Amino acid sequence: MAASAYPVLPDERLAAGVARLAVHHQGRYRVETVQRLIADSYERLAVNAHVRTHLVVPAERFAAERLDALAHVENPTAGDGRPRMLFVCSHNAGRSQMAAALLAHRAGDGVIASSAGTQPSGAVDSHLLQALTEAGVALDEVSPKPLTDEVVQASDIVITMGCGDACPVVPGHRYLDRPVPDPDGARITDLLDSLPSGS
């Protein structure tokens, strides 16, 4: 297929990520599909980004998560059987990031934990990162992500955390609502005190 048939990448550095994801999904998705999704992921993140030059790695991670979710939706029995948990709040900068990180820390490889926001901000709250680091929970290169249909549809349980009417509803899915207060502006000691014991 001619190169012109491929979706245009908003940043040429994304080409390496397209190549990696295309190899990972070889036989499942065509290169054009991968390139379209990584370009879309970049543009979605760019809407609220403070600096667009730092979006290449987050866009690849976001696209990888979306491709994995899409593959699961298309063939649920092909997965490894781990439950998929999605935490959703408004900005994906505090509550949902903290909940997904704590679940991943506690459950290890026993669960697939992810998070998203209905109106994602430009960065994860620095106080939250510090609090989780002090509690021994590693958050490697995280960034707020917008909610996408395939990630919601791939989830076994969607836990909403104060996003109100903007929270997603997909028929047949299990939903839990946990109206956790927004940690924005909270002191580090308060954040640490709010973490479950044993974290």
Image: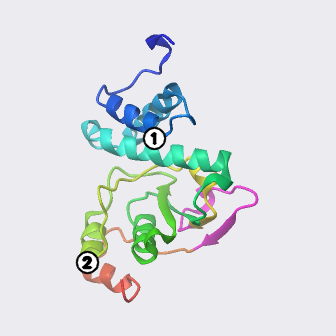
**38 over 64 or under it: above or below:** above
Rendered-image quadrant of the C terminus: bottom left
Q: Which residue is mark 1?
A: 24
Foreground of the two, 64 or 149: 64
Report the residue at 38% width, 83% height from top: 194
Which residues fall within the magenta stretch?
160-177
Binning the other alpha carbons within 10 Å of mark 2 as few (below 14), some (14 to 19) or many (20 upward) gives some
Q: CA distance from mark 1 to mark 2?
A: 40 Å
Tell me if I can see residue 181 in this picture: no
Mark 2 element type: helix
In this rendering, is residue 177 above or below 151? Answer: below
Residue at screen point 39% across, 53% down: 144
Which type of secondary structure does the marked residue at label 1 adopt? helix
The amino acid on which the numbered mark 1 sits, given as a three-letter code, is: His
Q: Which mark is residue 188?
A: 2
Residue 60 position in % (x across, y down): 38, 41
Spot occupied by residue 105 in the image (x, y as percentages of width and height): 39, 73
